[in-house]
Image (cartoon, grey):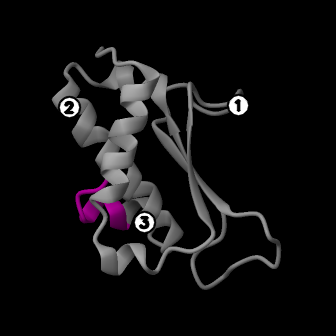
Amino acid sequence: MVDVSPERFEELVDDALDAIPDELAALVHNLVVLVEEEPPPGEAQDLLGLYDGSTLGLDAAGYLPDRIFLYRRPLLDYCRTEAELVREVRVTVVHELGHHFGLDDARLHELGWA
């Protein structure tokens, strides 16, 4: 387990988002990334991230944004070093963003983002 402050964790998330290529980021609309300490009751407590929304192109008629949740405590527990955490935050962001674009877990695994 690695331990970083909530502020440092937010910086790592920001860095992961900044690393998304501009061409891909330009396709993302009405999406927020939220950091929660742990998954909600009813979800696996080792869940690293979760996409909640519609697949791009199949947008619901509502105004609420799609959401990517990153779960800080499971990510910290999963990693032994800050370098591992940097990588895993990036992988989790890309993985959940892949769901926004309609990729399922099997395809994300094939691409190395699972």
Secondary element at image label 1: loop
Residue bounds of the magenta highlight:
107-113
Q: Amino acid at mark 3?
A: Gly
Q: Nearer the viewer, residue 110 or 16?
A: 16
Indicate the secondary structure of the residue bearing disc 3: helix
Residue 7 magenta: no
Q: Secondary structure at mark 2?
A: helix
Residue 52 visible (yes or no): no
In the rendered image, the quadrant that contains the N terminus is top left
- The answer to whether residue 53 is above or below residue 49 is below
* Residues at discs 1 and 2 in contact (Cβ within 8 Å): no
Residue corresponding to mark 3: 98
Residue 59 visible in the picture:
yes
| Residue at which label 2 appears | 84
Q: Mark 2: few, some, or many residues within 10 Å (few <14, many ≥20)?
A: some
Check if residue 112 falls in the magenta segment: yes
**Position of residue 71 measured from the top left corner of the image (x, y, whole percent):** 51, 33
The amino acid beneath tag 2 is Glu
Q: Position of residue 5 (x, y in %)?
A: 40, 18
Q: Nearer the viewer, mark 1 or mark 2?
A: 2
Residue drawn at point x = 66 percent, y = 82 percent: 58
